[in-house]
Amino acid sequence: MSKEFRGSYGVLVTPFTEGGKSVDTAALKNLLDWQIKSKSPGVIVLGTTGEFLTISDDERRTIVETTVKHIDGRIDVLVGTTNAYTPNAVRYSKEAQELGADGL
């Protein structure tokens, strides 16, 4: 990952279905589409507004996979990989790279 990032990126919230039982991927795609239509150079998922401390590893993977696939190279995808336990942060960073994130 040696790309140079410029501009103002949208820092997304993580939408959940009613009752908060799972990630609302349809709502996430709507947020992504809005960023694309607004000509944002990229998005940041799982940042400080993305519920990163309270979601499961499966939910984290779903968010990153959905975002990368839906964006499909049209704008940059940056993924927050913060965790209080360093080995988890390293694992999340590797996974984000493997799933196609443009940056961390």
Image (cartoon, grey):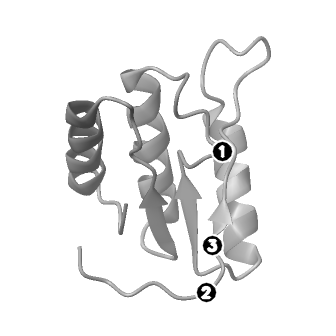
Indicate which disc, 1 or 3, sits on the residue closer to the N terminus: 3
Q: Amino acid at mark 2?
A: Gly
Mark 2–mark 3 CB contact (< 8 Å): yes
Distance in Å between CA atoms under marks 2 and 1: 22 Å
- Residue 97 point in image, percent of width and height: 25, 56
Mark 1–mark 3 CB contact (< 8 Å): no
Q: Amino acid at mark 1?
A: Leu
The residue depicted at 35 percent of the width and 60 percent of the height is 101
Distance in Å between CA atoms under marks 2 and 3: 6 Å
Indicate which disc, 2 or 1, sits on the residue closer to the N terminus: 2
The residue depicted at 72 percent of the width and 54 percent of the height is 31
- Residue 89 point in image, percent of width and height: 29, 40
Residue toward you, 38 or 86: 86
Q: Is residue 76 above or below residue 67?
A: below
Secondary structure under the numbered disc 3 in the rendered image: loop
> What label does residue 7 carry, if any?
2
Residue toward you, 49 or 66: 49
Residue labelled with disc 3: 9
Write down the quadrant of residue 40 in the picture: bottom right
Q: Amino acid at mark 3?
A: Tyr
